[in-house]
Amino acid sequence: MRLYHHPKSSSARRVLMTAQHLAADLELVEIDLMSSDDRRRLEELNPNSKIPVLEDGGFVLWESAAIMQYLADRTPGQTLYPQNVRDRADVNRWLFWTCQHFGPALSVFTWENVWKKMVTGVDADPAELARAEQGLAPLATLLDEHLARRTWLVGHDVTLADYAIAASLMYVERARVPLARFAHIVAWIGRVQQLDAWKKTEPTW
């Protein structure tokens, strides 16, 4: 199997964390998103022109959550993606939630405070950051309350849900995401950061 990725992509990182946990045998191909040649190559695989993309023989799969599920389903005896139908649905709930709601809310901070100046030369927009903080607050409250009485998001062990949401938070400090008051999220991300899957997928700067 071949994974097209970039180490600084949070979407790619959730797949890399999953692969690391599962000891999946992946050939990693780094895509330079600033290269027109690499972009053209990527679009041939994914018409959305986004990473990650998994290639398994003649099968090409894009969307990070789908790739995570596929890798888990290919791994006998794995526990990241529970077999119990309700636990699996619960994991799916959090995968969809972070892709649809939490991740996009976080991405505003990442763009404004990490990438914007680097890409455009323009400073962060305080009004945009204020709007983003207002949008993030109810989502962070929901997640914080969910984690108040549990170690991991679903059940008693780490699952795809933890890796998906944790990857969305990989720039929490660099992007100055206002999460310090959400003590249960802070404690949970600290637990994730102790896992080998996190440590071995940390990008270099």
Image (tube, rainbow, N blue to C red):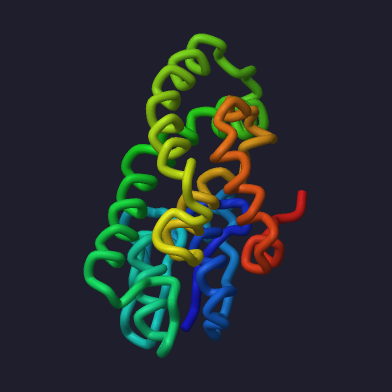
Q: Given the current orientation, which residue lies at the most extreme left position?
A: 85
Q: Given the current orientation, which residue lies at the most extreme right position?
A: 205
In this view, the residue in front, 31 or 89, is 89
Q: Residue at x 62, y 28 (%)?
A: 180
Above or below: residue 115 compared with residue 83: above
Above or below: residue 176 compared with residue 128: below
Q: Residue at x 77, y 49 (%)?
A: 205
Residue 174: name its quadrant: top right
In this view, the residue in front, 203 or 60, is 203
Residue 195, x across and y down, in percent: 66, 64
Residue 36, x across and y down, in percent: 52, 53
Q: Is residue 181 visible?
A: yes
Residue 103: name its quadrant: top left
Residue 122 placement, left or right of 168: right
Residue 49 placement, left or right of 157: left
Above or below: residue 46 compared with residue 120: below
In this view, the residue in front, 49 or 110, is 110
Q: How many marks?
A: 0
Q: Residue at x 71, y 62 (%)?
A: 199
Residue 121, x across and y down, in percent: 65, 23
In this view, the residue in front, 37 or 112, is 112
Above or below: residue 135 compared with residue 105: above
Residue 200 placement, left or right of 86: right
